[in-house]
């Protein structure tokens, strides 16, 4: 499993992310071929070596040859969906842009569908976001980690006039994520950079890993006494184990029916919860009740809390964090006689563990008129022999 760690000691921006990936070994020709799949025109891209405070890195640039229109989220999604990019690259890019649109809407008090991307709607930002998603896939990255994001200070010129640093959209994007307050008088983390990393990365220590490649992506500004660079380290875990931290929401429920509790669990999972579980408890006054526990990414805790409050069955939610130790895993799709089945594959001490998705298994069993064991053994054979029916997502 390949991992990448973004060391944002001097901040992060979209062009710095691509520059760092290029510096770490991403071939510029392959990146250009992916960007060409967008079908855009009126631009040139470049990559050149530069030095920042005696540290060498790669400066990625997009030169716009013609005036570009302002775009709303629907138009940007149409460009990405209509492109020839791979499906998983499209999915990541759209998630990043939608998250950015929601942040802009909240920051400026307007509906998402009416947000006009001035800076980020230009071709260069579409290239930054789609190029980052495509570059990570080209490098075979399975897991993304990031250091806390430094915010900077002062003000920055935008299409809305002078804005405080961090820009309002950036402030929304980093909500729920670790940040570092600095006195550096410039914008260290841009909205585009924040959107990419808060959408794709885990803000936890990657654990022990073997570094295979290092790259530096250069920013535009000169900073006295600090190299304006984003560093990436690419490698693989030194062990089979991963560590991360998630948000934990808990509430004691004694005024909810079994039917509504089941519906609430489904709604929480649809809203982005990683896991939802219920434990029978006895509350004060000897009341039988349910302890609802929800695990989620830190940035989703407010959204999920609103779902719980929406039931009208509780007035309070306990919030904390939980540390998780996990086996490193990869997600693949296996072609079976009953159709495609999504499978998680992990290894520990040389032993391979296979976990098929239940809903896919149920569909495959029904279509092939086969038992669970029949489909499971078919998956085992495909993975063991590395047949072409197994493909990585």
Image (tube, rainbow, N blue to C red):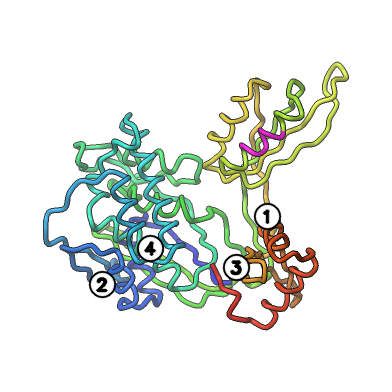
Q: Which residue is mark 3?
A: 333
Distance from the alpha carbon under mark 3 to that under mark 4: 24 Å
In the rendered image, the vertical position of residue 376 relative to residue 220, given as above or below: below
Q: Quadrant of residue 310?
A: top right
- Element type where label 4 sits in the image: helix
In the rendered image, the vertical position of residue 154 relative to residue 48, given as above or below: above
Q: Position of residue 337 (x, y in %)?
A: 67, 71
Location of the C terminus by quadrant is bottom right
Q: Earlier in the sequence, mark 1 or mark 3?
A: 3
Residue furthest top as drawn: 285
Q: Is residue 265 magenta?
A: yes
Q: Earlier in the sequence, mark 2 or mark 1?
A: 2
Distance from the alpha carbon under mark 4 to that under mark 2: 14 Å
Q: Earlier in the sequence, mark 4 or mark 2?
A: 2
Q: Is residue 149 left or right of residue 390?
A: left
- Residue at coordinates 23% horizontally, 65% vertically from top-left? 61
Distance from the alpha carbon under mark 3 to that under mark 2: 35 Å
Give the class, few, some or many, for how many residues have Cα within 10 Å of label 1's Cα (few <14, many ≥20): few
- The reply to whether discs 1 and 3 touch (Cβ–Cβ < 8 Å) is no
Q: Is residue 31 magenta?
A: no
- Residue at coordinates 36% horizontally, 53% vertically from top-left? 193
Tell me the tag on residue 132.
4
Q: Which residue is mark 2?
A: 47
């Amino acid at each position: 499993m390949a991992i990448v760690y973004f060391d944002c000691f001097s901040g992060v921006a979209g062009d710095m992310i691509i520059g760092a990936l290029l510096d770490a070994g991403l071939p510029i020709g392959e990146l250009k071929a992916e960007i060409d799949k967008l079908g855009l025109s009126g631009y040139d891209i470049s990559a050149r070596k530069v030095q920042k405070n005696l540290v060498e890195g790669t400066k990625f640039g997009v030169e716009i040859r013609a005036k570009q229109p302002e775009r709303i989220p629907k138009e940007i999604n149409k460009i990405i969906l209509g492109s020839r990019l791979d499906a998983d690259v499209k999915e990541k890019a759209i998630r990043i842009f939608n998250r950015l649109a929601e942040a802009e809407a909240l920051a400026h008090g307007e509906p998402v569908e009416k947000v006009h991307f001035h800076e980020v709607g230009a071709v260069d930002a579409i290239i930054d976001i789609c190029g980052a998603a495509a570059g990570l896939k080209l490098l075979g990255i399975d897991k993304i980690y990031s250091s806390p994001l430094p915010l900077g200070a002062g003000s920055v010129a935008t299409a809305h006039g002078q804005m405080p640093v961090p820009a309002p959209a950036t402030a929304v994007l980093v909500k729920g994520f670790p940040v570092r307050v600095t006195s550096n008088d410039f914008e260290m983390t841009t909205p585009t950079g924040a959107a990419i990393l808060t959408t794709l990365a885990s803000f936890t220590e990657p654990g022990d890993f073997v570094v295979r490649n290092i790259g530096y992506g250069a920013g535009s500004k000169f900073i006295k006494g600090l190299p304006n660079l984003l560093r990436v380290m690419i490698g693989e875990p030194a062990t089979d184990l991963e560590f991360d931290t998630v948000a934990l929401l808990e509430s004691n429920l004694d005024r909810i029916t079994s039917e509504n509790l089941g519906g609430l669990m489904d709604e929480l999972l649809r809203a982005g919860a990683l896991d939802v579980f219920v434990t029978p408890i006895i509350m004060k006054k000897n009341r039988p009740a349910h302890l609802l526990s929800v695990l989620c990414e830190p940035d989703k805790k407010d959204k999920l809390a609103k779902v719980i409050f929406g039931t009208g069955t509780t007035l309070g939610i306990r919030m904390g964090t939980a540390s998780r130790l996990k086996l490193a895993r990869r997600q693949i799709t296996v072609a079976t006689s009953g159709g495609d089945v999504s499978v998680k594959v992990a290894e520990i001490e040389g032993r391979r563990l296979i976990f098929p998705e239940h809903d896919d298994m149920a569909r495959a069993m029904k279509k092939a008129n086969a038992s669970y064991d029949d489909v499971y053994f078919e998956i085992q054979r495909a993975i063991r022999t590395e047949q072409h029916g197994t493909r990585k997502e």
